[in-house]
C-alpha cells in the first residue's frame, strides 16, 4: 500500500480529537437549566427581602429570563448539532481511506463505493446553513428586543407591554417573547430529529460498511472484524409523546440520553480504530488487534452489557480520563455564564428605569447619544456573545481538543474585560450595582484559574494530542492567542508515549 494512503488513514485517526467531541451530560444539563436556576434564586431573594430594589421588576425579570432560557437552549442544541456535523465530515474521509486500502488489495470495491456514496449523501447536513441563519436571526432579534431599538419610533407604540403589578414600561413584550419561542422551536425542529437519530443510524451505517469491508478483505486472507453496534435504537414517536405529556420537561432527560448515545458511539469507533491501525499501517500483514482486556463476541449483533462496561472502563481509563482539577474550571465557567445572564437582565432593567432617556434613541442619533447610553447598549450585545462563547467552552471541556483548552483560557481573559469596561465607562449605580463584582478580586481569581490551566501537567497532558510531547509553558501562553499547538509540538517515540500514558493514569 502506498505511503500516502497509509498516512491519510493514520492522520485521520490521530487528529480525531479535532472533530470527535465528548460532551459531559451533567454539565450540559446544568447549562440548559441555568437561567431557570437564576430565576429561582432571584424569586427567593425577592421573597426574603434581599433584593427589595428589584421588587417592581419581578415580572420583567421573569420574562427576560424566559427569553434567555430559550436563547441558551438554542445555543446548546446548535453545539450538539455541530459536533455531529464535524464527526460526519471526518468519517467521510475515514471511509474513503478504507476504500483506498481495499482497492490496493485488488478486491472488487464496487459495493463499498456505492455504500460510501450512499452514506455520504445521507449525512450531508444540508440544513446547516439554515440553522446558522436561524441562530443569527435569533441573536439579532433578541438583542434589538432587549434594548427596544427597532423599528424607529416603536417605543411610542401602544403595543409596549405594561405589567399590571408595576406600571413600568418594559422593553420586552409578549410579541417579542413569542417570536423568540417560535425561532427556538424552528431550531429545535430542524435539530431534534437529527441529534436523536444520528448516533444509531450513523453507527448502523458504519457497521454495514465495515461488514462489507471485512468480507472483501477475507477473500485475500486479511481477517478484519466488522464494527459492532453499541448504540441502542430510540423510538422517536415515544419521545415526542412523552415531551407533550410532560410539557417539555422530558427534553432534559432526553438530552442526557442523546449525549450519552453519541459519546458511546465515539468510544466504540475509537476502540475499533485502535484495532484497525496495525492492519492498515502494515498493509494487511499485521492482524486486527483488540485492545488489551477487551473481549468482544463477534457473532453478537449488540454488545453485551458486561462487555460494554469492560470496554468503557478500559477505554476511558486509557485514553480520555478527565483530570479532576478541571471541575474547578467547569464550576467557574458556570458562574461566569450565570453572571452574564444577570448582567443582561440588570442592564435592561436599568434601561426600563430610565426609560425617557432611551425612548428616543434611534439609528439616526445613536452616535450622538451620551457615552453611558452607548456603552449600555453595546454591553447587552457583548454579554450575549460572551454567553455563547462561555457555553461553547464549557461543553467542550470533556474533549481532548487543544482548542477546548484555548476556549477555557480565553473565557477567563474575556470575563474581566467587560468588568473593566463597566468600571471605567458605566458607573455601577442603581440596579446593575447589585450584580457588580469587585473588579480587582475578580481579576485575581480568574487569572489564578488561568494559571492552573497553564501549569498543571495533568491538564496539559490531557489536551496534548496523542503521540506528542507536552509543550512548554511559553508555548501554551502563545497558543492562547495565536497559532496551532500541533505545529509547535514535536512527536515522541513509542517508549515516551507509553510513559506519558502511565503518568496520565
Image (cartoon, rainbow, N blue to C red):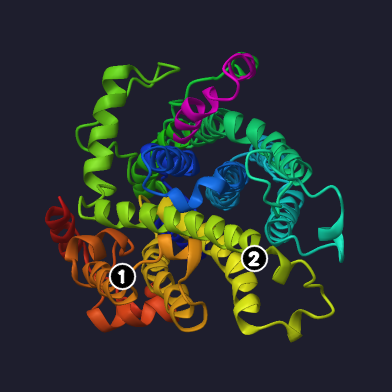
Q: Return the x and y of residue 498 as percentages of the image width and height.
A: 17, 57
Q: Return the x and y of residue 286 as percentages of the image width and height.
A: 33, 46
Is 247 in the magenta? Answer: yes
Q: Is residue 377 left or right of residue 104?
A: right
Q: Label for residue 385?
A: none
Mark 1, other Cα within 10 Å: few <14 / some 14–19 / many ≥20: some
- Which residue is nearer to you in this view: 170 or 454? 170
Q: Return the x and y of residue 146 as percentages of the image width and height.
A: 67, 57
Can residue 487 be seen in this snapshot?
Answer: no
Q: Return the x and y of residue 149 as percentages of the image width and height.
A: 77, 65
Q: Specify start and end residues of the magenta stretch as a single range.
A: 240-259
* Residue ID at (17%, 60%): 500
* Secondary element at image label 2: loop
- Which residue is nearer to you in this view: 475 or 189? 189
Q: How many numbered circles does the render carry?
A: 2
Q: Which residue is mark 1?
A: 442
* Magenta span: chief secondary structure: helix
Q: Please determine whether, in this image, residue 301 is positioned above or below residue 415.
A: above
Q: Label for residue 354?
A: 2
* Residue ID at (39%, 73%): 416
* Residue ID at (38%, 77%): 479
* Secondary element at image label 1: helix
Can residue 217 be seen in this snapshot?
Answer: yes
| For marks 1 and 2 on the same chain, the one whose residue lies earlier in the sequence | 2
Amino acid at each position: 500500500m502506498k505511503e500516502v494512503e497509509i498516512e491519510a488513514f493514520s492522520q485521520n485517526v490521530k487528529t480525531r480529537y479535532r472533530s470527535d467531541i465528548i460532551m459531559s451530560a451533567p454539565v450540559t444539563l446544568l447549562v440548559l437549566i441555568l437561567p431557570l436556576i437564576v430565576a429561582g434564586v432571584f424569586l427567593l431573594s425577592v421573597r426574603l427581602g434581599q433584593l427589595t430594589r428589584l421588587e417592581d421588576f419581578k415580572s420583567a425579570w421573569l420574562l427576560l429570563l424566559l427569553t434567555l432560557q430559550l436563547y441558551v437552549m438554542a445555543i446548546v442544541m446548535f453545539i450538539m448539532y455541530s459536533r455531529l456535523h464535524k464527526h460526519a465530515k471526518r468519517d467521510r474521509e475515514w471511509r474513503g481511506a478504507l476504500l483506498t486500502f481495499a482497492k490496493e488489495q485488488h478486491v472488487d470495491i464496487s459495493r463499498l463505493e456505492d455504500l460510501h456514496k450512499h452514506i455520504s449523501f445521507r449525512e450531508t447536513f444540508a440544513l446547516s446553513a439554515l440553522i446558522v441563519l436561524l441562530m443569527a436571526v435569533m441573536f439579532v432579534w433578541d438583542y434589538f428586543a432587549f434594548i427596544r431599538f427597532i423599528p424607529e419610533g416603536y417605543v411610542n407604540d401602544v403595543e409596549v407591554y405594561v405589567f399590571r403589578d408595576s406600571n413600568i414600561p418594559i422593553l420586552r413584550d409578549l410579541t417579542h417573547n413569542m417570536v423568540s419561542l417560535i425561532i427556538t422551536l424552528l431550531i429545535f425542529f430542524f435539530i431534534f430529529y437529527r441529534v436523536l437519530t444520528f448516533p444509531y443510524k450513523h453507527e448502523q451505517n458504519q457497521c454495514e460498511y465495515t461488514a462489507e469491508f471485512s468480507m472483501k478483505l477475507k477473500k485475500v486472507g486479511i481477517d478484519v472484524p466488522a464494527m459492532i453496534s453499541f448504540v441502542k435504537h430510540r423510538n422517536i414517536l415515544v419521545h415526542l409523546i412523552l415531551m407533550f405529556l410532560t410539557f417539555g420537561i422530558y427534553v432534559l432527560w432526553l438530552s442526557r440520553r442523546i449525549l450519552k448515545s453519541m459519546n458511546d458511539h465515539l468510544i466504540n469507533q475509537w476502540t475499533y480504530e485502535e484495532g484497525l491501525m496495525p492492519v492498515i499501517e502494515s498493509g494487511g500483514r499485521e492482524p486486527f488487534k483488540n485492545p488489551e482486556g477487551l473481549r468482544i463476541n463477534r457473532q453478537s449483533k449488540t454488545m453485551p452489557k458486561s462487555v460494554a462496561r469492560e470496554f468503557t472502563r478500559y477505554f476511558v481509563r486509557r485514553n480520555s480520563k478527565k483530570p479532576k482539577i478541571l471541575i474547578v474550571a467547569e464550576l467557574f465557567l458556570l458562574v461566569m455564564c450565570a453572571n452574564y445572564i444577570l448582567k443582561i437582565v440588570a442592564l435592561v432593567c436599568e434601561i426600563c428605569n430610565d426609560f425617557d432617556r432611551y425612548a428616543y434613541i434611534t439609528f439616526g442619533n445613536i452616535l450622538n447619544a451620551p457615552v453611558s447610553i452607548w456603552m449600555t447598549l453595546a454591553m447587552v450585545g457583548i454579554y450575549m456573545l460572551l454567553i455563547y462563547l462561555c457555553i461553547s467552552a464549557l461543553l467542550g471541556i470533556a474533549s481532548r481538543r487543544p482548542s477546548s483548552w484555548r476556549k477555557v483560557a480565553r473565557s477567563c481573559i474575556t470575563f474581566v474585560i467587560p468588568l473593566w469596561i463597566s468600571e471605567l465607562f458605566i458607573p455601577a449605580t442603581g440596579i446593575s450595582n447589585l450584580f457588580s463584582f469587585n473588579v480587582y478580586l475578580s481579576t485575581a481569581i480568574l487569572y489564578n484559574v488561568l494559571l492552573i490551566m497553564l501549569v498543571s501537567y495533568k491538564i496539559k497532558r490531557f489536551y496534548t494530542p496523542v503521540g506528542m510531547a507536552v509543550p512548554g509553558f511559553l508555548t501554551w501562553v502563545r497558543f492562547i492567542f495565536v497559532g496551532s499547538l500541533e505545529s509547535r509540538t514535536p512527536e515522541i517515540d513509542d517508549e515516551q508515549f507509553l510513559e506519558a500514558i502511565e503518568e496520565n493514569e
